[in-house]
Image: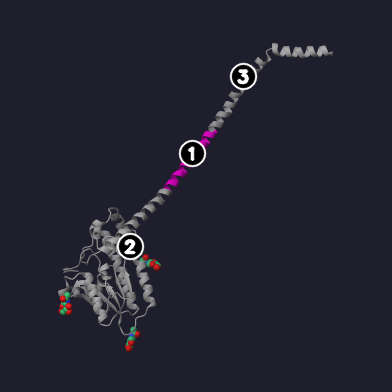
């Protein structure tokens, strides 16, 4: 083929391309192909979208469930923290109220519920158990001397329960059942400690806030809960019934010390019995429920 022929051929093909409107045709084709392809793709696409949608939905549901359970666990944890918070909060109030003999009005309202739960959920019992455990541990390491001069003082009123204790404790007004329960639990641990000390050979001296007129009833009650064999039971003399109970306890301890007794320990659930002079080597203060502090005295009480 001549060079001309080549050129003609090139020109022709270029012409034919332009004359046949190749580019137009091409684009139409592309369009047609595109339309054809997109309808095919649509099927693939829609099923893809449906599949993806279903997967996404499943994923969302899974996430929602996870979040929900996470939230639940979280709110559970938060509840516990809230409980611990209000518990510590009320415990601080309780300590202050107990030290200062403040009445129920002093407490924030939230503490009434906390005080009842403290008893009902067993924390009061655990606290008592721990304190009694500490005391037992102490006495297991100490030994009384054999001249009956080493003595342990116990609060005689801790052996009484709410049913037979004349008292003005605020807990009774808040929740009677919780009050009775706490009183029974305290009684149980006081008796347990008493028996342990007695078995260990410790001479026990009991001091009560009640007047001499109740001596027989008190002795009978102590025997009924299994607490016999004490060295002495000190009650208020007729001329001492108006005396503040803390003063009464202090006076009796001082007198015992003057008589030559060596007080090893003083044990009580109430502040009035564990304050003042001559408390001995150790004081064991049994825990008291939040509103169960004696804010008034037993002065003038004529029954158990
Ligand atoms: C008291 O605490 C001891 C552990 O010190 C435990 O073995 C015992 O079961 C507890 N008793 C009560 C009544 O909680
Ligand atoms: C204490 O000593 C006396 C003798 O002085 C003895 O009869 C008594 O059994 C002893 N008591 C104890 C608890 O050891
Ligand atoms: C009460 O009377 C006794 C004697 O019977 C006496 O020893 C005691 O000091 C008196 N107490 C008061 C507070 O007066």
Span highlighted in magenta in the image? 51-72
Instruction: Report the colour scheme.
Output: one colour
Estimate how packed mark 1 is, as few (under 14), some (14 to 19) or many (20 or more) residues with alpha carbons within 10 Å: few
**68 w.r.t. 162: above or below:** above
Q: Which residue is mark 3?
A: 31
Please tell me in which quadrant of the rendered image residue 162 appears: bottom left
Q: How many marks?
A: 3
Main SS, magenta region, reads helix
Asked whether residue 97 is in view, the answer is yes
In the image, 302 versus 259, the foreground residue is 259
Estimate how packed mark 2 is, as few (under 14), some (14 to 19) or many (20 or more) residues with alpha carbons within 10 Å: many
Q: x%, y% of residue 238?
A: 15, 74
Residue furthest right as drawn: 2
Residue furthest left as drawn: 239
Q: Which residue is mark 1?
A: 60
The residue that appears at 20% across and 71% down in the rendered structure is 210
Asked whether residue 226 is in view, the answer is no
Ligand 1 contact, mark 3 (Cβ < 8 Å): no
Please tell me in which quadrant of the rendered image residue 243 appears: bottom left
The residue that appears at 82% across and 12% down in the rendered structure is 5
Q: With 24 as the anchor, is 218 left or right in this view?
A: left
Query: Are the two marked residues, 1 and 2, in contact with CB atoms closer than 8 angstroms?
Result: no
Residue 193 numbered tag: none
- Of mark 1 and mark 2, the one earlier in the sequence is 1
Which image quadrant shows ligand 3?
A: bottom left
Q: Which residue is mark 2?
A: 124
């Amino acid at each position: 083929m001549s060079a001309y022929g080549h050129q003609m051929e090139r020109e022709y093909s270029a012409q034919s391309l332009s004359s046949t409107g190749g580019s137009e045709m091409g684009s139409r084709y592309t369009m047609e192909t595109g339309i054809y392809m997109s309808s095919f793709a649509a099927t693939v696409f829609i099923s893809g979208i449906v599949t993806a949608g279903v997967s996404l939905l499943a994923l969302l549901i899974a996430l929602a469930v996870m979040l929900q359970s996470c939230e639940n666990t979280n709110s559970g944890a938060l509840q516990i923290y809230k409980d611990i918070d209000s518990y510590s909060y009320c415990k601080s109030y309780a300590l202050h109220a107990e030290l200062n003999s403040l009445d129920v009005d002093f407490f924030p309202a939230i503490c009434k519920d906390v005080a009842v739960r403290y008893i009902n959920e067993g924390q009061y019992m655990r606290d008592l158990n721990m304190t009694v455990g500490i005391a037992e541990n102490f006495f297991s390491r100490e030994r009384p001397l054999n001249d009956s001069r080493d003595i342990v003082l116990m609060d005689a009123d801790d052996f009484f329960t709410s049913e037979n204790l004349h008292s003005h404790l605020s807990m009774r007004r808040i929740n009677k059942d919780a009050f009775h329960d706490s009183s029974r639990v305290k009684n149980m641990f006081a008796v347990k400690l008493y028996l342990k000390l007695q078995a260990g050979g410790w001479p026990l001296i009991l001091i009560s806030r009640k007047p001499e007129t109740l001596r027989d009833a008190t002795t009978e009650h102590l025997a009924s809960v299994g607490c016999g064999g004490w060295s002495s039971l000190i009650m208020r003399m007729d001329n001492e019934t108006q005396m503040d109970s803390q003063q009464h306890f202090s006076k009796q301890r001082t007198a015992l010390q003057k008589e030559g007794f060596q007080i090893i320990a003083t044990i009580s659930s109430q502040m009035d019995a564990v304050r003042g002079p001559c408390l001995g080597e150790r004081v064991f203060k049994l825990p008291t429920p939040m509103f169960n502090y004696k804010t008034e005295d037993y002065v003038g009480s004529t029954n158990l």
